[in-house]
């Protein structure tokens, strides 16, 4: 066996030949078996190197991508302005009538509660009206004490003082009262106030009258005119003899004023009943004339009260005054307010006659009885009409 030295030239040639023989085999193997792919290892971060560019495509977050695309908002309605910035309004005037009605038992003078809308029948100029609502009002009062204070008779002044004193005692803390007197002129002692001390001082000042004339018509006209400037329901407590001596107004004019006054109820308390009982009925011409004047004066007071839905009293004795003012308080603090739309809806300013009746379910006059079955008579106190509105200009 021949031994070849590692550095012999023949050994070098042999190694070169082996190398040439292995190169084709390695290439064929590379074509038959694809090389295994390896995951490239990123180079270590270099703080000093350039910033990485993530490209121009930005993916939304999952939450944002899942949200539905909102629908496009509707275009806003264009705002239309009136020319020159003017403001215009449409007004529909539907007439509504409120009637204050009081139902009182004739025997006990008590207020009758519990009545419903179907128990009332309202006739306007004889035509039945449809009542839309009925409610009971219990509110503080706004009243004027109109007192006759004239130098004609001590008895008349004494009756007036007693009656005004009892009305003063019936006042409540939230009542507003004004005090006025009349003789030849009208005098305002105190304006509307709820201070009872002020009212008491004005009544205590009635000591010496100035004139003997009693201008009732002028005083009542002025009082109604002042009350018309106050909103809400008002009351006039007229305490006097009912005589008129020197007024500028006639009876027809004051009756027209009373008829046209709205939301004002007059209660009258006549003075001098005892004197008329003692001396008015005596024989002779003077006694007959005095009695006739007294009856006419009382009839005027009754007319003022009836036209406005109030009550008229003519107490003979002082002991009847507490009952008189108890009836007045029951009337003005407890009353039914009837609301209806008139069938005659014309705004012509005409006067409409109104009558309030009580009926049962069948339309017959309502009958009342006490617990023992005895029939009870009652009275309906309500104004007898109103003036329609004037046309809107």
Image (spheres, rainbow, N blue to C red):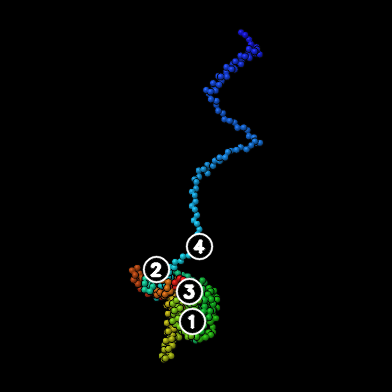
- Disc nearer the start of the sequence (3/2): 2
Quarter location, residue 15: top right
- The secondary element bearing badge 1 is classed as helix
Mark 1 lies on residue: 218
- Percent x, y for residue 164? 49, 79
Query: Distance between the Cα atoms at labels 3 and 2?
Result: 24 Å
Numbered badge on residue 82: 4
Quarter location, residue 292: bottom left
Numbered badge on residue 234: 3
Asked if marks 1 and 4 touch (Cβ < 8 Å), the reply is no
Q: Classify mark 1: residues with Cα within 10 Å, few (<14), some (14-19) or many (20+).
A: many
Query: Distance between the Cα atoms at labels 1 and 2?
Result: 37 Å
- Percent x, y for residue 131? 39, 68
The answer to whether any part of residue 181 appears in the image is yes
Mark 2 lies on residue: 131
Q: Residue furthest top?
A: 1
The answer to whether any part of residue 169 appears in the image is no
Query: Distance between the Cα atoms at labels 3 and 1?
Result: 19 Å
Query: Distance between the Cα atoms at labels 1 and 4?
Result: 51 Å
Query: Distance between the Cα atoms at labels 4 and 3?
Result: 43 Å
- Disc nearer the start of the sequence (3/1): 1
Residue occupying the point 53% across, 76% down: 191
Judge from the rendering whether residue 362 lies leftward or rightward of residue 254; answer left or right: left
- The secondary element bearing badge 4 is classed as loop
Residue occupying the point 50% across, 58% down: 79
Asked if marks 3 and 1 touch (Cβ < 8 Å), the reply is no
- Disc nearer the start of the sequence (1/4): 4
- Percent x, y for residue 190? 54, 77
């Amino acid at each position: 066996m021949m031994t070849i030295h590692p550095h012999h030239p023949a050994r070098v040639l042999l190694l070169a030949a082996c190398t040439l023989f292995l190169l084709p085999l390695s290439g064929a193997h590379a074509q038959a078996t694809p090389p295994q792919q390896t995951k490239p290892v990123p180079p270590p971060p270099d703080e000093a190197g350039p910033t990485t560019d993530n490209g121009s495509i930005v993916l939304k977050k999952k939450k944002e991508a899942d949200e539905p695309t909102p629908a496009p908002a509707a275009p806003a309605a264009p705002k239309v302005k009136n020319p020159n910035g003017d403001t215009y309004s449409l007004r529909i005037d539907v007439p509504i009538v409120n009637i204050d009605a009081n139902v009182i038992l004739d025997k006990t003078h008590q207020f009758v509660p519990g009545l419903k809308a179907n128990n009332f029948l309202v006739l306007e100029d004889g035509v039945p009206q449809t009542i839309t609502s009925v409610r009971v009002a219990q509110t503080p009062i706004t009243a004027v004490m109109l007192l006759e204070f004239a130098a004609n008779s001590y008895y008349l002044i004494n009756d007036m003082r007693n009656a005004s004193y009892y009305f003063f005692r019936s006042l409540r803390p939230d009542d507003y009262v004004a005090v006025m007197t009349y003789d030849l002129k009208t005098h305002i002692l105190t304006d509307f106030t709820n201070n009872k001390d002020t009212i008491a001082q004005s009544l205590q000042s009635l000591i010496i009258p100035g004139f003997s004339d009693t201008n009732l018509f002028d005083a009542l006209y002025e009082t109604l005119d002042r009350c018309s400037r106050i909103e809400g329901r008002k009351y006039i407590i007229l305490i006097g003899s009912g005589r008129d001596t020197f007024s500028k107004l006639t009876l027809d004019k004051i009756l027209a004023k009373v008829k046209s006054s709205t939301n004002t109820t007059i209660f009258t308390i006549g003075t001098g009943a005892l004197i008329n009982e003692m001396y008015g009925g005596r024989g002779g011409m003077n006694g007959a004339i005095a009695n006739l004047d007294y009856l006419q004066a009382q009839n005027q007071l009754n007319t003022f009260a009836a036209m406005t839905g109030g009550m008229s009293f003519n107490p003979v004795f002082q002991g009847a005054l507490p009952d008189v003012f108890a009836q007045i308080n029951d009337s003005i603090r407890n009353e039914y307010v009837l609301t209806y739309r008139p069938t005659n809806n014309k705004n012509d300013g005409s006067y409409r006659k109104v009558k309030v009746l009580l009926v049962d379910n069948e339309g017959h006059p309502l009958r009342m009885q006490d617990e023992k079955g005895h029939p009870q008579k009652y009275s309906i106190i309500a104004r007898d009409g109103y003036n329609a509105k004037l046309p809107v200009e």
